[in-house]
Image: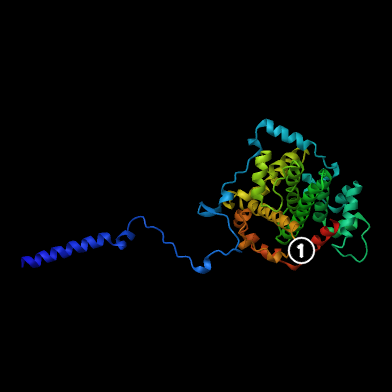
Amino acid sequence: MILSSIILVLAAMAAIYHLRKSPVNKASSNSPAPSVPRRRASDQPSSKALVLTPAVATDSLLVPAQLAALRLIDRDELAAERRQALVADLVRVPRPPLSLQKLISPELLDDANSHEICDLIIGEALIAARVLARVNSPFYGLRSPVVSIGQAVTFLGLNGVRSICLQYMMDESFKASSPERKQAFNIVLAASGFAGELCASLAGRLDLADQGSLVTQVVLSFLGHLATTSLMPSDSMLPTREHGLIERTNAEQAHFGLGAAEIGGLLMEEWNLPASLVAEVREIDRILVTPPDTMESNRSMRLALCYLCARLGERLALSSPHDLTAMDLDNDSSADLFYLRRHLNAPRLARLTEFLHSAELRKSIHQMQLAIRTRD
């Protein structure tokens, strides 16, 4: 009897000891360790696979490390002496003709009619020649030439003509001192042209208000990129369009103290462009670092469209004839588009990819690429 009791006690003690050492007991603790699934052989990265940037957790999102580390410097943060020196360099950039400044005045941004636009263009012979050259180029394939500005404006549309005039303004303001710098200018100008074309088409299909303002803003967002290309020393070239916006912005802030968007804002202020326009243009590239839930939805939608057109414009300027259907925004892992993809979730932008892949827009972009290559 005693022996049986001793055996039972020993068995109970052994059971308690076993439970304390059991991994099942550890798994029931208050702070469970997350399980990590084993990686299958098919998940292993191949030598040809796209290498993604490491990511860090921020607000429940996996923000790419290079984006999380970026802080955009506002012009008001720049030391007074450095800012004055930068403005002094920008002052040397020729101002656009008064007629072009009037073209982007608040009263003409959205309410201009074809007669007013024609009067402005006729007053600038070089602009008139460029508009006529554009409408009669192989880009449009007209059977008979267009010989009047009125016909050109009717055919191209107000936003198309506005984009051409703005590109002319930027082209005339920046003169290259070397073939390398000229090539860099041409790429930025081509990108602004593609961006304007994309914005005009997509804004129209999405039935957005103030389409003239959007086209103007997206084209002018390249002004700062032209300025940084102009100001950089020949012996220390900054990252080119082939590099992403994050890398370029880091290099610009290290070299100039500000990124291209802020430098463009300073230049537009020196040209006495409307303050409201300057503010909107400065905000476009800030979509790079701005979560959509930090701004009003309509503003988020409009700035996101401009930012998308600007980034796609850069890609198109660097590529051979590019099929827009190859641009899959939902699966694009570029850090430059990280927050943009969330801005594009707006209900009014639900058909954006469909419009972007439309045969009409693809044909227009393809013809534009051919025209640019022929010109170059």
**Residue 11 position within the rendered picture, expressed as x and y whole percent measured from the top left:** 16, 65
Front-most of 150 and 90?
90
Q: Name the quarter where the C terminus is drawn.
A: bottom right
Q: Which residue is mark 1?
A: 321
Q: Quadrant of residue 28?
A: bottom left
How many numbered marks, from 0 up? Answer: 1
Crowding around mark 1 (Cα neighbors within 10 Å: few <14, some 14 to 19, many 20+) is some
Task: Identify the amino acid type marked 1.
Answer: Pro
Q: Name the quarter where the N terminus is drawn.
A: bottom left
Q: Is residue 266 visible?
A: yes
Secondary structure of the residue carrying numbered label 1: loop
Q: Residue shown at 57%/65% (left/top)?
A: 46
Q: Is residue 110 visible?
A: no
**Residue 323 position within the rendered picture, expressed as x and y whole percent measured from the top left:** 73, 65
Q: Is residue 155 left or right of residue 40?
A: right
Q: Quadrant of residue 51?
A: bottom right
**Residue 352 position within the rendered picture, expressed as x and y whole percent measured from the top left:** 67, 62
